[in-house]
Image: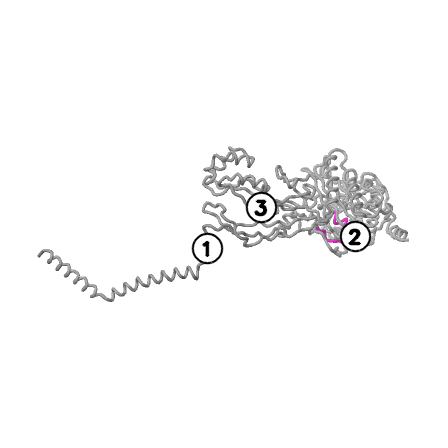
Amino acid sequence: MIAITRQSDKNTRKNARTGKSLQGYPARYRILKGLFALAGMVILSRVMYLQVYDSSFLQQEGDKRTVRYESIPAHRGVIFDRNGKMLAVSAPVMTLWGDPRQLVDQQEHWPKLARALEIPASELATRIRNNASKEFIYLKRQVTPEEGMAILNLNIPGVNSYDEHKRYYPMGEVAAHLVGITGIDDKGQEGLELGYDSWLTGKPGTRRTLKDRRGRLAKEAEVTKSAEPGKEIMLSIDLRLQYMAYRELKKAVTELKASSGSLVMLDIETGEVLAMVNQPSYNPNNRSGMQAYRMRNRVMTDLFEPGSTLKPFTVVAGMESGHYNRDTEIKTGNGYMRVGRNAVRDLNGYGTIDVETVLIRSSNIGVSKIAMEVGADGVMSVMRRIGLGQSVGTGFPGERTGFLPYKDRWSDFELSTLSFGYGLTVTPLQLAQAYMVLGAGGVLRPVSLIKRDVPPQGKRVIDERVAKEVLGMLSSVVSQGSGRRASIPSYPVAGKTGTVRKVGGSGYSEDRHVGLFAGVVPADNPKLATVVIIDDPAGEKYYGSLTAAPVFSKVNAQALRMLGVKPGHKDVLTAGVGGWFRYVLNDAG
């Protein structure tokens, strides 16, 4: 009993000492309680702030783990011909991709998946194992929605998809060089697809989706931004003429065993390109085995010496000088003329002939004498005015400007060779533009690959009388001279042949040539200017009169009928400007 009482007294004394200690520091006690209360209030206010005033922050943090924003591909703009026929259009496709981290555990499904993807099972297994630590690999790109859904319906974990667009070209290789192609990312890579890529490309949209922690789609939410399709383009080409020109050029290049060929047709009244074709070509819908040399738009990019097709413009320079007209006589002798240390030759000795016969017989000596009398300034002025040595300005990627020499001093031989188309280079399109000037009565209009609603006024670069006079002489070239195979029944044709030796490693080659024909139809009321190039034909049929002229005839004969151009008189313009006016008066009466 005494022991219990002593222990109780001891506890009482201890409690008394403790109470005395706490009561001895009242300020510290109050501060400690205040800090705990303040911390509680801060935490409580922060919780209330996040829940009431800044709930979006918590929502965002949660969305980062479950909500995904995916791109909605935009439809690329359609490319049409001038009549509304589709040349390039985008179709919806599906791209299949896989998550190797999941697929590596689905080996029992690999054979089934490989069969659906149409690839060897060993190849699929290797790809999955080699990328087992990655989150993404392509399984198959740009398949049809039907093919893609068939694979997705296998319900193999780790197999996913997203939507894309694939470019399709209904006319295949017929319009490939002009229209161009896009890459697998739907971005322009060649041709007008590249030149107008920013115009054709749309703006992608976005959609918000809900996915689980494994990245599987749990719920698709709303579209947050709609995709904006690209803008459309209506080209100047007429698909009927394009196909017909392609067919005839391909046939000629094949029969002549030529290395390549080009053809371009312009509307003289508007400057629009109605047809532009090349050989060899390529199929933009099938990229396997595609070769770079087949993809080149030679009408725009290839340079060549124009040869005798340039002689009419030397005659223009002579007539502008006032020293020459259609009937001015020129002594060409026996077909040989010494110029400095060099010689200029004709195929035959034509003796004394007039300017018209110079073009009919394609006399190198005749145009050389005209050029040397007119001088380099006069000849070069005409060349510049018709657009040689300058960009045509179509905006086509890779368009070449050609080469027109600029010199302070010209030797007689340099000027002589320039007069009949050597020593300078042009593209087929530049040459067609030059002949378009003659057909338009001396007016230069800008060339366009895009359809025009209003024809441009153009700029006069050659006197109208001179242009019509030269056009009359070129009509005689077709009716009486080397251009006979370019003639068209019921339609008068004005044009000029050309045959150029190709440059080799040791100078001009003796057995490699380029055959050309450039002209306008109908000569009595010019509508079309066309240039045909046959490069390096095999055998002895390499002259432009045998290779290019027949193609010109076939293509333009069909084109005139397709366009509804009424037949005229073949003999118009052969009698000169006077004959032109007599025809107009007689036809009107």
Q: Earlier in the sequence, mark 1 or mark 3?
A: 1
Report the disc number at residue 151. Answer: none
Q: Is residue 206 left or right of residue 231?
A: left
Q: Which mark is residue 60?
A: 1
At mark 2, the secondary structure is loop
Across and down, in percent, residue 2 comes to: 8, 57
Residue 406 in sight in this render: no
Mark 3: few/some/many CA within 10 Å (<14, 14-19, 20+): many
Q: Which residue is mark 3?
A: 164
Dot 1: what SS? helix
Q: Is 443 one of the magenta-colored residues?
A: yes
Q: Is residue 219 left or right of residue 470?
A: left
Label annotation for residue 440: 2
Q: Which residues are magenta?
A: 431-448
Amino acid type at circle 1 is Gln
Name above or below for residue 54 compared with residue 566. below
Confirm whether the magenta stretch covers residue 513: no
Q: Position of residue 291 (x, y in %)?
A: 63, 38
Q: Are marks 1 and 3 in contact (CB under 8 Å)?
A: no
